[in-house]
Image (cartoon, rainbow, N blue to C red):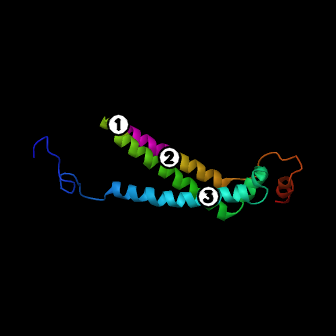
């Protein structure tokens, strides 16, 4: 094979042995995209259409949602899927446009480390959220709830 000839798409010169991570990344992007559409529109519907709409969203509303495991897991799943989906998309862009192998490797590692850090931080915030930590002396509903606990 000369330098001017392209290898056949399915030839062994193109395909490495082992797991086809690009294929699984492609599948993940499609599946996570569909799930994210459902999760995001569900999130928007509950927050903006039910109850008082946008005027009802305040600290107490968020505290009430984070008090139930269903909404905690809903938001964590949305967070995880969105961050991994975005990092995988950015990885694809880096692989397409960055020509230097060392720079490409550094950028891809930086992407995954950043995504991992944000996933960890976001998960900790959702599952350790305590609405009674702030000084609540404004006579709100949360003041009564926090006094009882």
Q: Residues within 10 Å of mark 2 (few under 14, many from 20)?
A: many
Query: Furthest-bottom residue in view?
Result: 70
Asked if the magenta segment contains residue 112, the reply would be yes
Q: Position of residue 54 (x, y in %)?
A: 75, 51
Judge from the rendering whether residue 119 lies leftward or rightward of residue 54; answer left or right: left
Label 3 sits on a secondary structure element that is helix
> What's the magenta region?
106-115
Q: Are marks 1 and 2 in contact (CB under 8 Å)?
A: no
Between circles 3 and 2, the one closer to the viewer is 3
Q: Are marks 3 and 2 in contact (CB under 8 Å)?
A: no
Q: Residue at x 60, y 56 (%)?
A: 40
Q: Residues within 10 Å of mark 1 (few under 14, many from 20)?
A: few
Q: Is residue 66 visible?
A: no
Q: Residue at x 35, y 38 (%)?
A: 97
* Distance Cα–Cα, label 1 vs label 2: 20 Å
Judge from the rendering whether residue 88 lies leftward or rightward of residue 96; answer left or right: right
In the displayed structure, 147 sits above or below 93; it is below
Marker count (numbered): 3
Q: Nearer the viewer, residue 81 or 54?
A: 54
Q: Position of residue 30 (x, y in %)?
A: 44, 58
Q: Position of residue 44 (x, y in %)?
A: 66, 55
Q: Which residue is mark 2?
A: 115
State the image quarter where residue 41 is shown.
bottom right
* Distance Cα–Cα, label 3 vs label 2: 23 Å
Q: Residue at x 35, y 35 (%)?
A: 103
* Distance Cα–Cα, label 3 vs label 1: 34 Å
Point out which mark residue 98 bears: 1
Q: Which residue is mark 3?
A: 41
């Amino acid at each position: 094979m000369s330098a001017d000839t392209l290898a056949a798409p399915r030839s062994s010169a193109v395909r490495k042995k082992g797991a086809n991570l690009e294929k699984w990344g492609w599948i993940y992007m499609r599946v996570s995209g569909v799930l994210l559409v459902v999760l995001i529109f569900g999130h928007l519907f509950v927050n903006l259409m039910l109850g008082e709409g946008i005027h009802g969203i305040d600290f107490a509303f968020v505290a009430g949602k984070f008090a139930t495991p269903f909404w905690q897991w809903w938001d964590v799943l949305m967070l995880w899927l969105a961050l991994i989906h975005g990092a995988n998309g950015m990885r694809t862009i880096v692989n397409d446009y960055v020509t230097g192998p060392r720079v490409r490797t550094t950028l891809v590692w930086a992407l995954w480390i950043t995504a991992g850090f944000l996933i960890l931080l976001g998960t900790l915030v959702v599952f350790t959220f305590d609405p009674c930590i702030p000084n609540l002396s404004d006579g709100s509903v949360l003041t009564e709830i926090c006094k009882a606990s």
